[in-house]
Amino acid sequence: MVKTKYIFVTGGVTSSLGKGIISASLAKLLQARGYKVTIQKLDPYINIDPGTMNPYEHGECYVTEDGAETDLDLGHYERFLNVPTSKNNNVTTGKIYQTVINKERRGDYLGKTVQIIPHITDEIKRRIKLLGSKNKFDVVITEIGGTVGDIESLPYIEAVRQLKWEMQSDCLVIHLTLVPYLPASGELKTKPTQHSVKMLLENGVQPDVLVLRTQRTLTIDVRKKVALFCNVEISSVIESIDVASIYEVPLLMKKEKLDATVLTKLGLALNNEPDLKQWTLFLNKLKNPKKQVKIGLIGKYVELVDAYKSINEAFAHAGAVNECKVDLRLINSETINEDSAGEILKELKGILVAPGFGHRGFEGKVTAIRYARKMNIPFFGSCLGMQCAVVEFGRDVLNLQGAGSTEMDHSSQHPVIDIMEEQKGVLEKGGTMRLGAYPCKLKKDTKAMAAYGKTLITERHRHRFEFNNSYLEQYEKAGMIATGINPDSQLIEIMEIPSLKWFVGVQFHPEFKSTVMSPHPLFVSFVKAAAE
Ligand code: GLN
């Protein structure tokens, strides 16, 4: 029986330094040495989960197999490790407080004053140890969201301090900071790192390893200086230099011996060198494409790279399989109408219509699909993208005047997309959609079946509306076919137009299941069709 070891990853100086990618890269290296690893994200906001936030606030909302709406970093964890995460991998301040307050109301603390220390910190510690409790993992990596010094992060840092004291050499802290380069003096500056470590020390936490994000190579003098001022060994000062692709980071961390340093400190055997053969193969294909294809991503959050994170990454995986660089163009659906569509979309070899909510940008998505269908350009619709394709076909091919989705138009004359039966009585917004993995049966001789190569699949969902089955016969007669159906509920999961080159809309989110080691078959097939 192994004793689970715990690694905490904190961040200083600024947000967006890439704690998630460093955590995922370290996890990848440990996994490649034969260890079982999982990664958890602690988010210091009061929402129970990011499901109620819009992408401007929080980027993409990632959905796990078990139906949790989570931080997009969990997507990176899955893409790197190829192991599903669960609702226990993302904890928020909202969840912590909700649990503690519910216990208080039940009388669990009867007679006591309920306080941040110990009650909130105990609940944080419980959630951290929960992942290690079933003996499933050798190492649990816990990424603490936010930046040290934030008021919101304090209880988390305190929990880390306590765990470090309790677990001693069974845990360690990695602190990620920034070493900026000042062109005026031509120097890398370590002061922000020193201050950030000082802040951690004020909270009682001595980091064991420092990962320094930098634009330029760290000189030995910079490393020495940081080691001296921050009480860490020089071998524990790790450089994390900017790179073109996040998928290079595991290799960089290997070069910097982050994995070996961590294992030694935790008293774990180094085993063999990490086996990164497949990973390197993927990276080589990613970096040396033989061709290029321009694909449009039609959505409404075009100014925000994080809004469609998983779609972006799924294209990277699928591009590599096809040895083809996907030149992904984000296009604001609000700019697309009958007059502008031709001009805006003319250079695209494939069109993907993104998931989404609400009526802003909806008509533009429908118009983009009309263009794709009429010009026979490969089309891929994810969730709302599929619903738009159904609306478009209803209006233009079936001549259903005013065909629409009741999400956008309550009184639609032809509600070809309608609220799901089970959703009709739902009033609360948080965590109440149809969420997580459901099975889907595929029909033979379809694009879907050809891509997956099997008849029963499961995919992840996040929606309240669905194809209205009372229109199915009309659709199929006119050439839009339901090729994937949920075997239990008969909900339509995939719609295709077989007479076209590649036209597939899916009610689920294929992007959430694409990983480096198993690129999503529909993305692979779509990129192939677009590149042909
Ligand atoms: N808004 C649509 C629904 O709720 C689609 C959701 C999505 O694209 N995730 O059904």
Image (spheres, grey):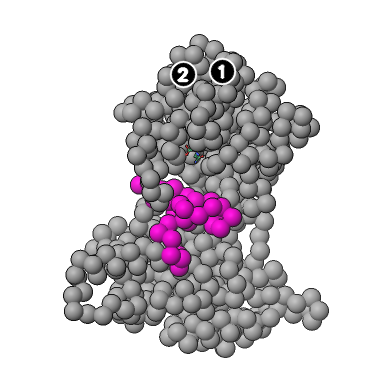
- Label 2 vs label 1, nearer the camera: 1
In the image, is residue 52 part of the stretch drawn in magenta?
Answer: yes
Residue beneath disc 1 = 400
Q: Position of residue 231 (x, y in %)?
A: 51, 87
For the stretch drawn in magenta, what is the main secondary structure?
loop
Residue located farthest toward the top when viewing the structure as drawn: 477
> Which quadrant of the structure image shows residue 421?
top left
41 relative position to 57: left or right:
left
Label number found at residue 348: none
Residue beneath disc 2 = 471
Q: Is mark 1 within 8 Å of ligand 1?
A: no
Q: Amino acid at mark 1?
A: Leu
Q: Position of residue 234 (x, y in %)?
A: 55, 81
Disc 1 crowd rating (10 Å Cα; few below 14, some 14-19, many 20+) is: some
Q: Position of residue 288 (x, y in %)?
A: 68, 45
Residue located farthest toward the front when viewing the structure as drawn: 411
Looking at the image, is mark 2 or mark 1 earlier in the sequence? 1
- Circle 1 sits in a helix, a strand or a loop, which is it? loop
| Magenta part of the chain | 43-72
